[in-house]
Image: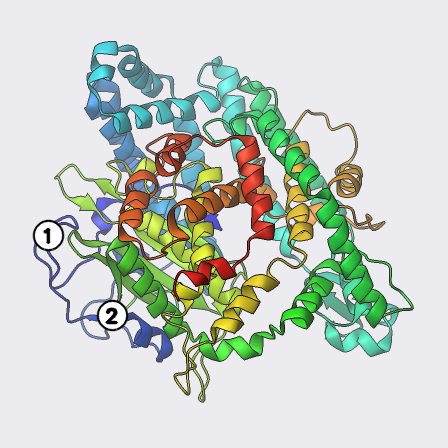
Amino acid sequence: MLSGCGRALPAALRLAVRGWTGGGGGGRRRVSTSWSPVGAAFDAKQQRSRLTGQSTGLFGVPELSSPEGFQEAQEKALQETEQLVQKACTTPPGPQTVMIFDQLSDALCRVADLADFVKIAHPDFAFREAAEEACRNIGTMVEKLNTNIELCQSLKQLLANKEVMDSLDPETRQVAELFMFDFEISGIHLDEEKRKRAVDLNIKILDLCNQFLIGAHLPNKIDKHILPEHIRYNFAVEGNYIQITGLHADCSDDLVREAAYKIFLYPNAEQLRCLEELLTSRNHLAQLVGYNTFAHRALQGTMARTPEKVMQFLETLSDRLFQRTLKDFEMMEGMKMKLNPQNSKLMPWDHPYYSGVLRAERYNIEPSLYCPFFSLGACMEGLNFLFSQLLGISLYAEQTEKGELWCEDVRKLAVVHENEGLLGYIYCDFFQRADKPHQDCHFTIRGGRLREDGEYQLPVVVLMLSLPHSTRSSPTLLTPGMMENLFHEMGHAVHSMLGRTRYQHVTGTRCPTDFAEVPSILMEYFASDYRVVNQFARHYQTGQSLPKSMVSRLCESKKICAAADMQLQVFYAVLDQLYHGEHPLKRSTTEILKETQEKFYGLPYVPNTAWQLRFSHLVGYGAKYYSYLMSRAIASMVWKQCFVKNPFDRAMGERYRREMLAHGGGKEPMLMVQGMLQKSPSVEDFVGALVSDLDQDFETFFMDSE
C-alpha cells in the first residue's frame, strides 16, 4: 500500500555519501566502508548509529533533532514559498516556469512528506503532535496556492503559448498540464467567494479524514458479563469491560469471531456522523469546482478516467466471478458443517477463517513449516539477487548518524546501480513496537528531481512493516504472507528509486493510483515463482533449500476460495464508488452497505453492524479503491507476457524500467502500459487477466527451470 501526501523534500536534505566519485547519483561506484551486506544486516542485531560527532535530526534534517524543529522547518519552507511564488509570477513563459513550480512544490513538501510519516510512526508523542500540526499548516498553504489567481495566470500564459509549448519535451508538457489540473480541481475558475469556500472545504475535509482514521481504529468496549465466560480470555479485559480491537478473523472459535465482528463493527454515532460529513463535504467540493460527483473529480487522470468505466469493470468482473464465488461459499459452508454442525450457516466472520482451513487441509501449508526457510535476512538477499539480475541494482546496509533514526531497529539501505551509481535510500522500519500502526506502507520522504545546479536530488523512502523481532535462538522468521508483503512493499520502493524524473512532482510512485500499485503487485508474482524463491529460501539452521513441492503447494493453495476473496474486493470497490457517487445519497451509508453486500458479495448483512466505519481506505483511496483490482490485472498481464518464461530476463527488466518504472507520473499511465504490453488493454482484457489467474497452473512456472 502507498502512503504519503505526494510531495517531496528539498535539495538541502541531501544525505552525505561516503566513498563516491561523481555527482548527483551519476559516476561509478566505489564501495563505501560504511556499507555492509544486506542479509547480514537484517539477521543480526542492529549496528548502533554513530555516537561520535555532532548529532543530526530525523533523516539528516538538522532542525528535526527535536519536535520543536518542525516549527522552524515549516517557517523556512513557507518563506521560500513566498519567494518562489513571486519568482513564478514575474518569469516569462518557458521551461523555467515549470521548474519554478516544481521548486515551489518541493519547498512546501520538504516538511509535509516527512511529517506525514512522523505523525503516525514516531514513538514519541511530542514528535507525532508536532508533525500533525505541520501537516495541517502546509496543507492549508497548498490549498491557498491552488486558488491563487496570479500564480495560475503565470502557468496559463505558458500553456497558451503554442510556440513555447511545442518546444518543450513531453515530460515538461505533462507536468505543466498536471499543475494546471491541480488549479482546476481546486476551483481556480470560480469567483473569489467560491474560491475561499473551496479552500475552506479542503481544510475541513483534511480534518474529517484525520478524525475518521482515528475513529476507524478505536476499540469498542462491552461489559464483560455479556460475553460467555469461556471466551472472555480471547480479549483484553479492563475492570468490568472487555476491549475489542479487531475482528479476530483467524480464531478457530466461531463464537469468538462472531462476538468480535458484532462488537467491533457496532455503529458509533460520532464516527457515523464523521463519515456522512466527509462524503457530503467531498461532494460539495466536487460540485463547486464543476464535477457531477466526487468520483468524477477523483478519477481525472487515472487509467479508468470515469466512474462509469470503473463500474463497467467491476460489474463485468462480478458477473464472471459469480458462479465461482458460489462454489467457494459452498466449500466453506461444507467445512463449517463438518467442524460445527450445530451452526453451519456461513456468515461474514467465517470467510477468512474457513478459506484458510480449506487451504491448510488440502495443501498442508501450516505457516510454521515455512517460516524457518524465510529468515528476514534470506528474504532481503533474495530481493537483492532478483533486483541485481533484473535491473542491475544492489542493496547495501549503511551505518546511520546519531539522531537520524526514530527507532534504533530501523535499517537504512543504499540503492546502487551497477553503472549509474547511488540511486537513493530506503529506510526499513520493519519491526513491531508499541503504538506502531499495523498496516504495511510505503512513504515517500523525498522525491527525486533534477536540481538547478545540475545534480540529481536522490529519492528517500520509508517501508513500514510489522514483523516479529529476532530471538536469542533464531533470526526474524517470516510467514509466506509476510514474505509476499515484503516483496510487495519493495516493489513500491524500487519504483521510487528508478523513477528518474526531472520533476519531483511526478517522481516514482507519484502517479495515478490505479497505476501506482502495478509494480508492487507484480512483485507478488515473483514471490510466488519457485525459480525466484529457490535463490534464497534456506533453512536458517540447516541451510536446506525449501523443497519445490512446498512452494508448489503454497501457490496452488492460493487458488482455493480465490474467487470469493476477489468478490469481496469487488464489493468494497463498488461501495466506495456508491459513497462517492450522486448526492444526496438515496439511503443511509449502512443501508447502502447492506444492499451492496447482498448484491456484490453474497454473504448476509449482519444487523446492527456498520463495517463502513472501519473502512479506512475511504480516506486515502476515496473513489479509487478499485485500483487494487485494476493494478492486479495489469501486473498479471505483464507477468505472463514478459516474465513467466524467465523471471531473471535482464532485457525484459530493462524494458520494464524504460517503459513503466522510469516515468513516475510524468507520462500518461495507459501509454506506459501500452509500451510494456505492446497493446492497449480493454475492460475485457482486465477482467480476463484476473479470472485466468484463478485457473493458472503454477506448475507451468516451474517446468522451464528444470
In the rendered picture of this protein, how many numbered marks are placed on residues?
2
In the image, which disc is placed on residue 86? none
Q: Is residue 672 left or right of residue 585?
A: left
Please state which of residues 373 and 549 is positioned toward the viewer in this rendering: 549
Please state which of residues 459 and 659 is positioned toward the viewer in this rendering: 659
The residue beneath circle 2 is 399
The image quadrant of residue 540 is: bottom left
Q: Residues within 10 Å of mark 2 (few under 14, many from 20)?
A: some
Q: Residues within 10 Å of mark 1 (few under 14, many from 20)?
A: some
The image quadrant of residue 438 is: bottom right
The image quadrant of residue 10 is: top left
* Rendering coords of residue 566 (x, y %): 64, 48
Q: Is residue 328 above or below residue 31?
A: above
Q: Residue at x 55, y 53 (%)?
A: 696
* Rendering coords of residue 295 (x, y %): 58, 29
Residue 209 visible in the shown view: no
What SS does tag 2 mark?
A: loop
Q: Is residue 306 left or right of residue 30?
A: right
The quarter of the rendered structure image containing the C terminus is bottom left
Q: Could you tell me the amino acid type at mark 2?
A: Gln
In the image, which disc is placed on residue 27? 1
What SS does tag 1 mark?
A: loop
Q: Residue at x 50, y 22 (%)?
A: 196
Please state which of residues 573 and 131 is positioned toward the viewer in this rendering: 573
Q: Is residue 560 above or below residue 374?
A: above
Q: Could you tell me the amino acid type at mark 1?
A: Gly
Q: Residue furthest right?
A: 342
**Nearer the N terminus, badge 1 or badge 2?**
1
